[in-house]
Image: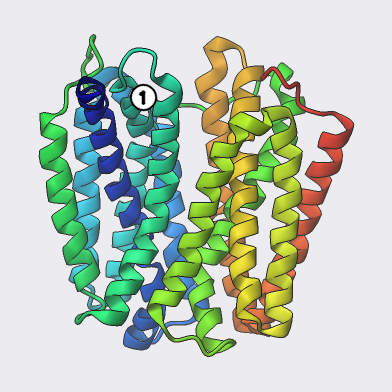
Amino acid sequence: MDSDRRGWLPCLLGGAVFVVCMAGTTLPTPLYPLYQEKFGFSELTVTVVYAVYAFGVIGVLLLAGSASDSVGRRPVLMWGLGFAAVSAVCFLCATSLGWLYAGRLLSGLSAGLFTGAATAYVMELAPPGGTSRATLVATAANMGGLGCGPLLAGLLAQYAPWPLYLPFVVHLALVACSAAVLLRLPETVRERRPLNTVRPQRPGLPTEVRAVFTAAATASFVGFALFGVFTSVSPAFLAESLDVHNHAVSGLVVALAFFASTAGQLAVGRVGVGRSLPLGCAALLAGLALLAGALRWDLLPLVVLSAIVGGAGQGLSFRAALSAVAGASPADRRAAVISTLFVVAYTGISVPVIGVGVLSDLIGLEDAGLVFIACMAVLVSTAAVYLLRRPVPART
């Protein structure tokens, strides 16, 4: 038993490093209302600040998504931790809006480096025969870390001093500990090559993938868009419409969406890819309906339910979409196809969110949210109908 635990220790430590990095990307979520008070900017600016993160992720995925395959996992992850640390410093030094933009962009660069490299690293650190369990560790670390960020920041902002500083000081300390752990973990890439061998990942879509990709990408777009709205404007909605000014509560609501997504991703193994994608679309539609009810009648329980149901739908649909497009892709084009799916997903986390910000300045936050929900409902319903008519093969 002790030897089994020691065998899994590197994998679990790699997962812990993954958690720390991803938590930093959502750390500012419950703090946006405080920044609005401090700097006096609109809801549109909040959404743009949030979306800058997605642009950073997309840039890294396209330009250096495969860098860790060449130069090694540890160097890329150390760079990711470095960007996370500098991002935290930007928020600590924030005296104007420009610091927030810089902090979010650096956070996106950090997440872009970690997304692929840390997933591969955690799986490679597992003992022989432990690939399935290691996949669960990587999935839980990724989405669970995203959920821990707003939860930690909300608790510190509500119940500890220096709400705009202490969360980032704590995160800096965790990043330093993670760097020390990473230095003691082994490198898993045996044949390392110079940095100049890294080539940009060009998005690509072979003909045989297009039938599966359209519905999978649409579901991914809607799921990430729902996350984008929750993480950018839900604290403002809770404060303005529901009179909920407790930062811990707003952080918990956002965290529940990410934790539910983790559960949804883990359920794909039991449900199967063929059924998970349409089921995820249905759950996303239900989450959108619950969010519409919350906006219409100003009910906190519906906000919580929409976070849980919509988060589970996002987890089901995205992991199934990833499996479906990977299974339908030729081996020599698989990385390009997956990069394309991630670009679509992270476009969903940025463009619709900015649209909500623009509309909120014109017609108010609640009505802007209802317009967003109607558009996303049309998209995900279309994807669901398509999947019912042309289901994804269960073997993918």
| Image quadrant occupied by the C terminus | top right
Q: Quadrant of residue 187?
A: top left
The answer to whether 367 appears left or right of 355 in the picture is: right
Query: In percent of the image, x 59 and y 22: which residue is there?
Result: 326
Q: Amino acid at mark 1?
A: Met
User: Quick one: 251 or 240, which is closer to the camera?
Assistant: 251
Vertical side of 21 occupied by 148: above or below? below
Helix, strand or loop under label 1: helix
Residue position for label 1: 123
User: Quick one: 187 or 84, which is closer to the camera?
Assistant: 187
Query: In percent of the image, x 34 and y 63: which residue is there?
Result: 27
Can the viewer see residue 346 in this picture?
Answer: no
Q: Quadrant of residue 118?
A: top left
Vertical side of 248 occupied by 207: above or below? above
Percent coordinates x, y for residue 15 in the rendering? 31, 37
Q: Is disc 1 surrounded by few (<14), some (14 to 19) or many (20+) residues within 10 Å?
A: many
Can the viewer see residue 273 in this picture?
Answer: yes
Percent coordinates x, y for residue 375 in the rendering? 76, 61
